[in-house]
Image (cartoon, helix red, strand yellow):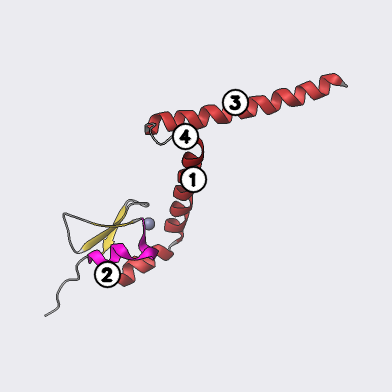
Amino acid sequence: MATKRKFRDEWLQQVEFQPWLTSVQADPTKASCTTCHIDFNANLTTIKRHKGTQSHQKSEESRKEREELLQNIVPQSSSNQEITFGVKFATILMLRHSVMKEKGRQSVK
Ligand SMILES: [Zn+2]
């Protein structure tokens, strides 16, 4: 009789599965990726295979980039909405600033 594989908490301790792997409370036979927002069967082969997929690696990359960006620019206490607005605003300011510098150089000639 085949027993169904269940999610093991020790997988959460494995560095290669951090920080995206999580258990599914409603279904112990499932594991979930918090980066891709998808569920899959809770066994090591499936989890490792998911880690190797292009879509997961892309999601991981953009998530890391976002986190690094936010950590560098915005104070930790800000809410998500404020962070998004702050980053957009800073980008607009930087763009405007460089455009104005270009114009200034040209008029000096
Ligand atoms: Zn994933």
Residue corresponding to mark 4: 74
Label number found at residue 43: 2
Q: Identify the secondary structure beneath mark 2.
A: loop
Q: Position of residue 90 (x, y in %)?
A: 55, 29
Question: In the image shown, does 28 or 54 lie closer to the viewer?
Answer: 28
Residue corresponding to mark 1: 68
Question: In the image shown, does 3 or 107 lie closer to the viewer?
Answer: 107
| Marks 1 and 3, how far apart at CA | 20 Å
**Residue drawn where x is 69% and y is 28% of the image:** 98
Q: Identify the secondary structure beneath mark 3.
A: helix
Q: Is residue 30 left or right of residue 78?
A: left
Residue corresponding to mark 3: 93
At label 4, the amino acid type is Val
- The N terminus lies in quadrant: bottom left
Among the 4 quarters of the image, the one containing residue 44:
bottom left
- The C terminus lies in quadrant: top right
Tell me if mark 4 has few (under 14), some (14-19) or many (20+) residues whose alpha carbon lies within 10 angstroms of its own: some
